[in-house]
Image (tube, rainbow, N blue to C red):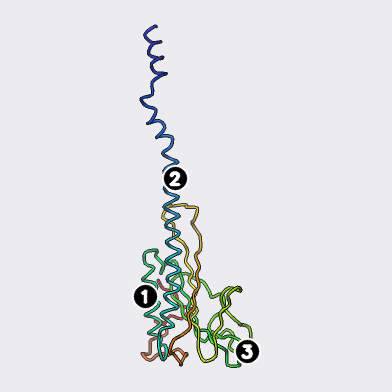
């Protein structure tokens, strides 16, 4: 009996397993915080990628000189999608490229042409191709605090990019989040703003906004 009592006393004052016990209790918390940090970093990286896609697309479209062709649009949209391959942008995103000009009547803005790429189904906030051509319904694009409008004799390449975030952790608190960015650049050294099709690219291969492809 005394031997058992002595063993119980020694067990009560023993601290040899204390660190292991504390680690076992803290491990779920540390693991949760680590996963939270990993998901947050991935979300921030996705924001950066989508922002870069919007800016790159608008800038490259604005750099096309003299005139713009369906082949030019296919090339620049393909390059934009490839830059987002790390976040599976083609399967989960959409790029909308619009050419914004003053309408023929001079009463407002006009989306002369619009091209899209990506599998996600979404429409432009500002309307489709032809919006504003015969009326004053479209005065500008962009946020109300920083409206964007084309000047006479030129055009603005307006890009909207939408992406459904793909979390790296199942059932993440960021699951279902949508990332959206817009960018606009004025065209440089291009006097003819109409969309050309010198290579006679078939309708099914153009990047019109009724088509969806990754």
Task: Locate residue 122, reporting x and y percent.
Answer: 51, 71
Mark 3: few/some/many CA within 10 Å (<14, 14-19, 20+): some
The Cα atoms of the two marked residues, 2 and 3, are separated by 57 Å
Among the two numbered marks 2 and 3 on one chain, the one whose residue lies closer to the N terminus: 2
| Quarter the N terminus occupies | top left
Res. 4 image quadrant: top left
Res. 9 image quadrant: top left
Say what secondary structure mark 1 lies in.
Answer: helix
Task: Locate residue 210, reporting x and y percent.
Answer: 48, 78
Task: Locate residue 199, reporting x and y percent.
Answer: 36, 90
Mark 2 = which residue? 32
Q: Name the residue rendered at 44%, 83% in the picture.
A: 62
Q: Name the residue rendered at 43%, 40% in the picture.
A: 28
Mark 1 = which residue? 79
Q: Residue furthest top?
A: 2
Determine whether 41 is above or below 17 in the image: below
């Amino acid at each position: 009996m005394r031997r058992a009592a002595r063993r119980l006393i020694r067990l009560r004052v023993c601290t040899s397993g204390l660190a292991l016990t504390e680690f076992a209790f803290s491990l779920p918390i540390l693991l949760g915080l680590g996963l939270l940090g990993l998901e947050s970093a991935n979300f921030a990286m996705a924001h950066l990628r989508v922002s870069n896609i919007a800016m790159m697309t608008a800038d490259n479209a604005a750099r096309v000189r003299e005139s713009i062709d369906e082949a030019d649009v296919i090339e620049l949209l393909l390059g934009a999608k490839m830059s987002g391959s790390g976040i599976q942008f083609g399967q989960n995103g959409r790029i909308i490229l619009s050419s914004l000009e003053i309408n023929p009547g001079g009463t407002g803005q006009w989306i002369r042409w619009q091209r899209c790429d990506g599998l996600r189904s979404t429409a432009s906030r500002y309307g489709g191709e032809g919006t504003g051509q015969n009326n004053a319904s479209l005065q500008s694009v962009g946020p109300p605090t920083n409206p964007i409008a084309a000047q006479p004799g030129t055009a603005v390449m307006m890009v909207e990019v939408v992406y459904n975030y793909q979390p790296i952790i199942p059932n993440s608190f960021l699951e279902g989040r949508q990332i959206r960015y817009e960018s606009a650049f004025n065209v440089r050294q291009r006097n003819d703003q109409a969309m050309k099709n010198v290579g006679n690219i078939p309708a099914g291969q153009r990047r019109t906004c009724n088509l969806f492809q990754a």
